[in-house]
Amino acid sequence: MPAIALHRISHQTTTGIPYQHLHIQITTADGLITPHDLQGLDLPSDIIWSQGVVLEGKAPIWLYGYLIHACHPAAWIACFDPRLGDPTPHSGGAVIIATHTHDVATGDILKINLPL
């Protein structure tokens, strides 16, 4: 099993905007990865690039940087922050960090509930 697993889930924001939720999972027994683990890491082949992508999961900043670059073709890219949501479990905000559409702007926060 690879050290990094990426799970794509079709989802929508609390206001109904469709997006691709990309959950990052570190699969090693100790929860640690190295930069070498980026070699051969592929995005899921069924990502819908005409929609946005929200990155979420416990991972080092350099993995997020890699995934942000790899997701460049998406309509927009956001990173999940649980501190920016409602005070309910599994909610948060997705901070837009890059966009190719006028529908959202860099710095916008989209409210989402994590897909379970």
Image: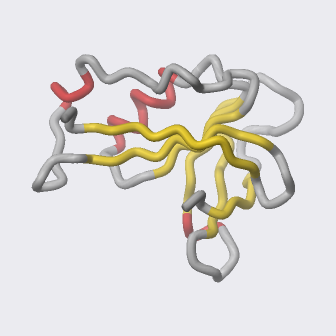
The residue shown at (85%, 52%) is: 16
Question: Where's the N terminus, which quadrant?
Answer: top left
**Furthest residue toward left:** 30
- The foreground one among 37 and 12 is 12
Residue 60, quarter of the rendered image = top left
Residue 89 lies, with reference to residue 115, above or below; the image says below
Question: In the image, residue 88 lies at what x, y percent?
Answer: 63, 81
Question: In the image, residue 90 lies at what x, y percent?
Answer: 57, 70
The residue shown at (52%, 43%) is: 55
Relative to 24, 104 lies left or right: right
Question: In the image, residue 38 lies at what x, y percent?
Answer: 26, 25
- The foreground one among 102 and 74 is 74
The residue shown at (63%, 69%) is: 91
Residue 93, quarter of the rendered image = bottom right
Question: Where's the C terminus, which quadrant?
Answer: bottom right
Relative to 8, 36 lies left or right: left
Colouring scheme, one of rainbow, by chain, secondary structure, one colour:
secondary structure
Count every numbered label the image shows and give the total: 0
The residue shown at (11%, 55%) is: 30
Question: In the image, residue 86 lies at what x, y percent?
Answer: 69, 76
Residue 3 lies, with reference to residue 25, above or below; the image says above
